Image: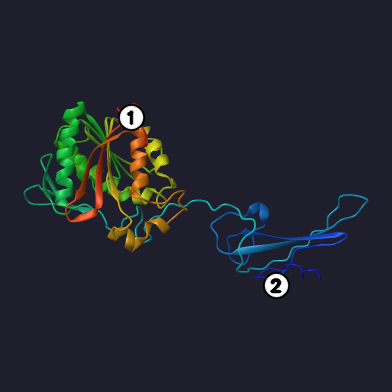
Amino acid sequence: MRAAPYRGGQPRARKRKASVGKNRISAVIYLPTPLVGSRWCLVGKISPPLSGRLVFSYSYKLTTAAAQMNALLAFAIIPVPMTLALPATFKAYRNPHRTSGSQSEVPQYTIASDSTILVRGYQRYNLKNHQVTAILSYNAKFEWIRKSLMRVRDDINASSLMDIGCSAGLISHLAQEVGYTTVLSLDHDAEYIKMLNEIVVLEKLSPVIRPRTFSFGDAFPSKVDVVIMGALIHWVFTCTANFGRFDSIMDYLMTTGTRVLIIEWVDPKDGAIKAFHHNKCGSAPQEPYEESLFQRALLRVGTITDRWALPNRATRIFYTVRLDARGNLTAD
C-alpha cells in the first residue's frame, strides 16, 4: 500500500515492515529528530537532541533498464529500539533556574561597616585587607587546603596556581594569602566570575588574582606550578563536560604544565551525587565512575603524596599528586 502524501501537521502513526521482493526492496530506518511546530526534518537536516524516533520507510522500485528509484516516504513515531541513529550532540548541564553555571546557589556579596567583604553563595567566607577572616562552610576542608598550599609552595618553590572551578574564589584568596603571586581563577559560571572580579578590584588584588570564565575542556590560558580542582570531578566526568574517562581528564590537566595537582574525589555514595545523579547527567561514561579507576589514572601521571578525607564527610577525599616524578612510576 502506498503512503498518503504528507500534508503538514502531525502524521498519523502507522507501522511499516521491511521486505525484499522480486523487484522491490523496502527498508525501515530509525532516526532521531527534533519536532519543531508541525514540521518534520528530513534525513539530511536532522540534528539532536532526541525527542522521538522518526521512521522513514523507503520503498525502492528497481528496473533492469536503469538504476532509477521511486522512493515513497511514510512517517510514524513508534517506541522501538533504533537500528540506525545519528549521534546525539553533547549538551553541558546548566542549572535551569539561573542564567549561568550549574550550582543552585546565587553569588552575592555585601560590604560591612568595617569594610569586611561578606561573600555568599556556594562558598561562604569573609574577606578584609587581603586576608580571609572567616570561613563559614566546610571550615576543616579549606583550612586543610590553606596548609597544603603552603607546604606545596615550600616543597617546589611554587609561585603560580590555577584554581579550576573557583566558584566564589575562596581558594584563590587563600592562595594569594599564603604567597602565590599569580592565581588564575577559572569557572564556567559567569555570575560568580563577575562577582569575583569586583571583589578582586575592591581588594586591589588584580595583579595577583585573575578570574575568567572558562569551560572545562577549553585550552588553558597559561602554564602554572600548581593546579587545584575541588569538588568538580563528578561534574566534568559526563555532566558539565564530556570526558567519560579519568585518563582523558588527567591528560587534559597535564596540558597546564603543572608540577603538583591537588584534586578532590567525590564518591558515588556522596549525598550530592545520590540527590542529583551526576553520573546520569549528560553523556554515557566510557568507564565506571569508581575511585579505583580514578586512583589508577592519577598514578599514570604522577605519584600520590597525600590522601585526606574530610573529617565529617568521608565521601570527599583530597589527593595531592607530584607530577614531575611520573617518569619513575607505573600504573600498577
Please, which residue is most extreme toward the right here? 65
Q: Which residue is mark 1?
A: 326
Q: Quadrant of the N terminus?
A: bottom right
Above or below residue 162? Residue 8 is below
The quarter of the picture where residue 7 lies is bottom right
Answer whether labels 2 and 1 touch (C-beta < 8 Å).
no
Rendered residue at 15%/32% (across/down)? 179
Q: Position of residue 311 (x, y in %)?
A: 16, 52
Name which residue type carries label 1: Arg
The quarter of the picture where residue 38 lies is bottom right
Nearest the viewer among 131 and 67 is 67
The mark found on residue 25 in the picture is none
Rendered residue at 18%/41% (across/down)? 173
Q: Position of residue 200 (x, y in %)?
A: 20, 40
Q: Quadrant of the C terminus?
A: top left
Q: Is residue 24 visible?
A: yes
Q: Position of residue 160 (x, y in %)?
A: 24, 30
Rendered residue at 29%/45% (across/down)? 193
Q: Which residue is mark 2?
A: 14
